[in-house]
Image (cartoon, rainbow, N blue to C red):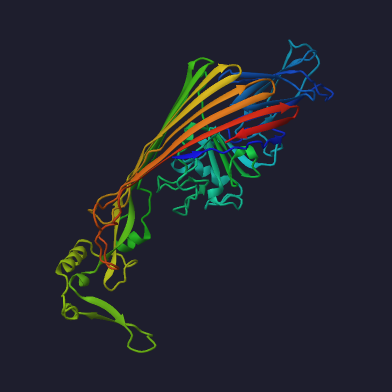
């Protein structure tokens, strides 16, 4: 069992904004002023989540500042009231993950019964709150942008400073950190040191777009319809944003609301528009089939209005496909006991000359023991059953290549469920569960052999409690558990037999199972004083 417990101990981070990076939360801040631009202390500021109707209230400081820390992601309505001024209402204030939203409010002189409504400040491109660099991707971008196989990790390639090999602004791929809803979902078995299996793969912090290996990437797969938003901090991350020196990737799961909402889609991709592989054409092998169905559905709503909310998402994928492989097989001449070779007729060896030893000559060379007839028959059978059709492998004298399309079907199943409960105006709780079961057939060593099967079955859970202790104190507690598990089946059950450098009848691999449970606890508390926030936390 792998348990990750560290702590910041007595270290504190003094910052001008809130603690919202690693916890999967956000913040809203601003200043309340009069028409002359002077600060209004003691003004009542209330934010209300428009989806769940949950609200928080605080008083502005002596400098007119307000900071709402560690709040749930979503759209908010901001209301400001002060004696002798009209009430101000700001709609469409967005709380984005890992990024505080600033909304300054100027009150007009009048009665509080009069209301002045304005729209919230748009998402600023330039971050003026701290030195961190990174972009936030919201739900609309995730669902509307064209993503191959609906893998939202493809969006990471749009981040400046990211490479397809997984390096972010010069840091290595294993230096990145991935959190979902504020808890660690990093790959503890590989340390996120992922290497792309193809030129079409992008790997950042263990998030892999490669579709040929279901054990790549973080422990939990990220369904596109289940992610509310995410942010990749590529440089200058704050101390509260993660525990690694590389990119900090923060994601948040969607929540239910008072209004029921849902989505569904299905994408189909067929073989008709696929081109054949060059090596397949050269060997006279037909193109590899590819029939891919990618589908997903989600639903969310309220169980108890304004109190208890649910969200559920299921994503699946079915690939009926094959992989073009080439194995080294004996040529027909070798099966007859003839050994071909090349020799140099002159010292310079400018023109090697092919030659061969007949079966009789080979038999005479092994006159003491003779040729093993069982082995010779095995080579003859292999040469007959798997005739060489590929010159790209083998020595061309005694061995060649046998190219064929090996079936490699893929089945992906991913479930996400989340409950949010508003205990009271100062406390809320959430529970998130992940269940994944994927299977993938690996290419047979040769047609007719046992087909190795990879089964990936990780689990995940997160529990979070947010408590507004007072006007200036907020505590955010998270517990996460991930169980990374996969089984890779082999094709051999006994001792392997092979003809060294000539022919191997199977891959001689045995079944391997690995399970890695990881517990993760984080607790952050912030004290707001004026326009400053003192942040203390442990991981």
Whether residue 10 sits left or right of residue 522 in the image: it is: right
Q: Residue placed farthest to the right in the image?
A: 36
Viewer can see residue 183: yes
Q: Residue placed farthest to the front in the image?
A: 10
Q: Height in image: 494 above or below 34?
A: below
Q: Position of residue 206 (x, y in %)?
A: 50, 46
**How many numbered discs?**
0
Viewer can see residue 319: no
Q: Position of residue 340 (x, y in %)?
A: 25, 77
Considering the image in quadrants, where does the C terminus appear? top right
Q: Height in image: 37 above or below 177?
A: above
Q: Position of residue 421 (x, y in %)?
A: 52, 20
Whether residue 529 sits left or right of residue 26 in the image: it is: right
Q: Height in image: 430 above or below 229?
A: above
Res 415 quadrant in image: top left
> In terms of depth relative to the viewer, which is nearer, 121 or 454?
454
Whether residue 39 sits left or right of residue 2 in the image: it is: right
Q: Position of residue 155 (x, y in %)?
A: 53, 42
Q: Residue placed farthest to the bottom in the image?
A: 346
Please report the residue visible at 32 percent of the width from the left and 45 percent of the height from the top: 409
Res 424 quadrant in image: top right
Please report the residue visible at 18 percent of the width from the left and 73 percent of the height from the top: 337
Whether residue 233 sits left or right of residue 284 in the image: it is: right
Considering the image in quadrants, where does the N terminus appear? top left
> In terms of depth relative to the viewer, which is nearer, 124 or 69?
69
């Amino acid at each position: 069992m792998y348990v990750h417990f560290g702590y910041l101990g007595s270290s504190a981070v003094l910052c001008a904004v809130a603690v919202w990076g690693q916890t999967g939360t956000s913040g809203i801040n601003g200043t309340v002023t009069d028409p002359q631009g002077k600060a209004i202390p003691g003004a009542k500021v209330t934010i209300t989540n428009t989806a769940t109707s949950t609200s928080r209230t605080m008083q502005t400081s002596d400098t007119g500042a307000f900071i709402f820390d560690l709040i749930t992601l979503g759209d908010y309505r901001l209301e400001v009231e002060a004696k002798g001024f009209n009430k101000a209402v700001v709609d469409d204030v967005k709380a984005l993950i890992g990024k505080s939203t600033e909304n300054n409010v100027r009150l007009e002189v009048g009665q509080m019964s009069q209301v002045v409504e304005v729209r919230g400040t748009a998402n600023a491109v330039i971050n003026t709150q701290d030195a961190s660099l990174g972009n936030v991707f919201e739900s609309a971008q995730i669902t509307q942008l064209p993503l191959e196989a609906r893998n939202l990790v493809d969006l990471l390639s749009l981040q400046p400073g990211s490479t397809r090999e997984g390096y972010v602004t010069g840091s290595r791929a294993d230096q990145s950190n991935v959190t979902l809803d504020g808890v660690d979902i990093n790959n503890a078995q590989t340390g996120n040191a992922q290497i792309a299996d193809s030129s079409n793969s992008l790997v950042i912090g263990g998030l892999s777009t490669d579709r040929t290996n279901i054990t790549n990437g973080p422990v939990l797969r990220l369904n596109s319809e289940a992610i509310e938003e995410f942010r990749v901090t590529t440089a200058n991350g704050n101390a509260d944003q993660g525990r690694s020196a590389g990119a900090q990737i923060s994601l948040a799961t969607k929540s239910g609301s008072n209004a029921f909402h849902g989505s569904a889609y299905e994408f189909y991709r067929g073989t008709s528009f696929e081109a054949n592989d060059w090596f397949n054409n050269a060997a006279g092998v037909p193109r590899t089939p590819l029939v891919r169905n990618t589908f997903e559905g989600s639903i969310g709503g309220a169980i108890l209005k304004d109190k208890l909310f649910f969200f559920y998402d299921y994503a699946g994928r079915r690939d009926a496909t094959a992989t073009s492989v080439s194995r080294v097989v004996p040529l027909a001449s070798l099966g007859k006991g003839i050994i071909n070779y090349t020799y140099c007729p002159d010292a310079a060896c400018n023109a090697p000359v092919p030659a061969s030893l007949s079966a009789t000559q080979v038999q005479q060379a092994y006159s003491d023991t003779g040729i093993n007839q069982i082995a010779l028959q095995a080579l003859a059978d292999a040469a007959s059953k798997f005739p060489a059709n590929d010159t790209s492998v083998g020595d061309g004298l005694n061995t060649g290549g046998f190219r064929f399309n090996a079936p490699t079907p893929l089945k992906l199943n991913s479930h996400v469920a989340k409950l949010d409960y508003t205990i009271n105006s100062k406390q809320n709780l959430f529970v998130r569960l992940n269940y994944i079961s994927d299977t993938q057939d690996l290419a047979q060593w040769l047609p007719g052999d046992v087909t190795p099967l990879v089964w990936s079955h990780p689990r995940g859970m997160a529990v979070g409690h947010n408590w507004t202790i007072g006007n200036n104190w907020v505590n955010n507690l998270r517990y996460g558990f991930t169980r990374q598990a996969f089984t890779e089946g082999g094709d051999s059950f006994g001792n392997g037999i092979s003809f060294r450098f000539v022919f191997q009848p199977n891959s001689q691999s045995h079944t391997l199972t690995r399970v890695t449970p990881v517990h993760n606890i984080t607790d952050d508390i912030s004290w707001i004083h004026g326009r400053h926030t003192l942040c203390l936390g442990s991981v």
